Image (cartoon, rainbow, N blue to C red):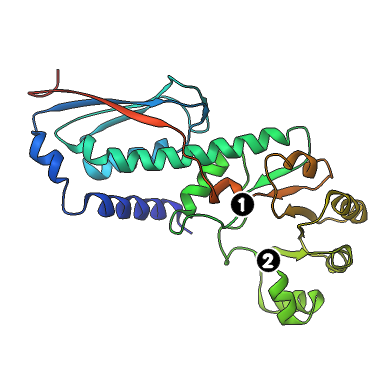
Amino acid sequence: MDSDADIRRIVEYALAEDVGPGDVTSTAIIPPSTHLRGVFLVKAPGVIAGLGVVGRVFAAVDEAIRYEPLVEEGTPVAPGDVVARVEGDGPGVLIAERVALNFLQRMSGIASRTRQYVEAVRGTRAQILDTRKTVPGLRTLDKMAVALGGGTNHRIGLFDMVLIKDNHIEAAGGITPAVRMVRERVEGLAIEVEVESLEQFDEALGLGVDRIMLDNMDLDTMREAVRRRGKAPVEIEASGGITLDTVAGVAATGVDLISVGDLTHSVRALDVSLDITLSMGGKR
């Protein structure tokens, strides 16, 4: 997937959705000679993400708008921090404002939540993974935000990794035939198998797959799976209903990866505002 082209498409669609044929209010009231300056002000603690996307929004509205991020992506922020500034003549800044804030707030919310999970498992071997539980059309941005929060991206979609789940296993008649079918028909991609019991784990382990997902297992069962792996070159991923309250216990079992749908499916936006001042008659 071409992420740059995908981001451009997302920005263009968001502006078309919000602006349509034009901002009737701003263009009626704000003359071209008006100079607007604005700062992006953080109002809650978190991790900032999406500054680059914000710049693309302003550029798409008016290439003459001057936009400057003031912190690096993935930086922890606190209330009162100014993370970027923008200025331009005419209504362009106001036209872009809502779309820019929507991207910045959502991506920062994802990065902030991800950082909480990453900190909760610090000192263990576990990496925090995202999932495909993203807003349709925004997966590229959601996964960018996870990475900026310190998480690791799982597969992008159904095309870049094999993940054999319960329905596939049932359709194939078992784990072994499912893996065999994939190896006969798919080349060059890692193979992961989802298992629901230690018996299934042992079967997948014996097939030499790349990764085994432990689905909704309790902690004792996870620990036993890790023990049974021994020195086999296979990653073990834990998945299923994992929360910020339970993730540390899961990490302590010795699993390599923990996938968390909560990173993207229930996002709480980070509170960031764009505070604007204007002067009539052009730049001063």
For numbered disc 2, what is the local secondary structure?
Answer: strand
Residue 235 is tagged as none
The image position of residue 55, as x and y in percent, is 34, 38
Seen at 70% across and 69% down, the residue is: 164
Rendering quarter of residue 80 = top left
The image position of residue 254, as x and y in percent, is 83, 44
The image position of residue 238, as x and y in percent, is 75, 52
Which residue is disc 1 drawn over?
Answer: 261
Marks 1 and 2 close (CB-CB < 8 Å): no
Which residue is disc 2 drawn over?
Answer: 163
- Residue 65 appears left or right of 100: left
206 w.r.t. 258: above or below:
below
What amino acid is at disc 2? Answer: Leu
Q: How many residues crowd mark 1 within 10 Å: few (<14), some (14–19), many (20+)?
A: some
Question: How far apart in space, not on screen, are marks 1 and 2 (Cα)?
Answer: 16 Å
Seen at 16% across and 36% down, the residue is: 91
- Residue 30 appears left or right of 177: left
